[in-house]
Amino acid sequence: RCCPLSPTGAQTTQLLVQPPWTPAVLWDRVTLTCQGSGTAAATTWYKDGQRWWQKGRDSFSVTETGTYTCDRPGTGHSSSVRVLNGEGGCVPWLPAPSCPTERLVLQLPARALLERDTVTLRCRG
């Protein structure tokens, strides 16, 4: 089992996050895994839009906040995963004045959601 297919049927690169919550938070001991065609040695990692790491690993434990993507030859760039530190974290889609002053992070499952799905949210702080 190599790679997921895009809506057009082409193989894509996927960035998986464990545990499967978004946004990912460092207190969860986050692991990122890049899935795509080719070997792990061909994986290139990006952090905050800059080439960050290319050590032939398709998986690693995150120790720094930032926005991560990966690239595999043949299937291209993955979508991004944002990793927060959990301190003063605001819900990223709310305007700044709505950000709580408490150190809370609202997390939802890191998977595709469909209408009428039952969803468990996680509020942590």
Image (tube, rainbow, N blue to C red):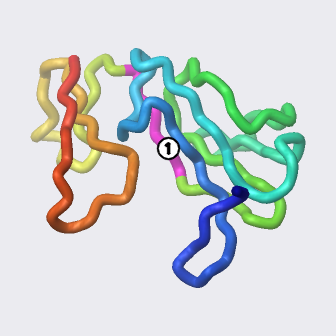
Residue drawn at 24 percent across, 33 percent down: 90
Residue 59's place in the image compared with 49, above or below, is: above
Residue drawn at 39 percent across, 46 percent down: 110
Q: Residues within 10 Å of mark 1 (few under 14, many from 20)?
A: many
Q: Could you tell me residue 97's position as x and y percent? A: 12, 40
Where the C terminus falls, by quadrant? Answer: top left
Residue 7 located left or right of residue 58:
left
Q: Disc 1 marks which amino acid?
A: Val
Q: Residue furthest front?
A: 1
Is 77 part of what is drawn in magenta?
no
Which image quadrant is residue 8 in? Answer: bottom right
Q: How many marks?
A: 1
Magenta stretch, main secondary structure class: strand
Q: Could you tell me residue 91's position as x and y percent? A: 23, 39
Residue drawn at 78 percent across, 55 percent down: 72
Which image quadrant is residue 102 in? Answer: top left
Residue indicated by mark 1: 81
- In the depicted view, which residue is nearer to us: 59 or 104? 59
Q: Could you tell me residue 25's position as x and y percent? A: 40, 26
Residue 28's place in the image compared with 108, above or below, is: above
Q: Which element is circle 1 on? A: strand
Residue 86's place in the image compared with 20, above or below, is: above
Magenta stretch, residue numbers: 80-85
- In the depicted view, which residue is nearer to us: 81 or 41? 41
Residue 36 located left or right of residue 117:
right
Residue 74's place in the image compared with 40, above or below, is: below
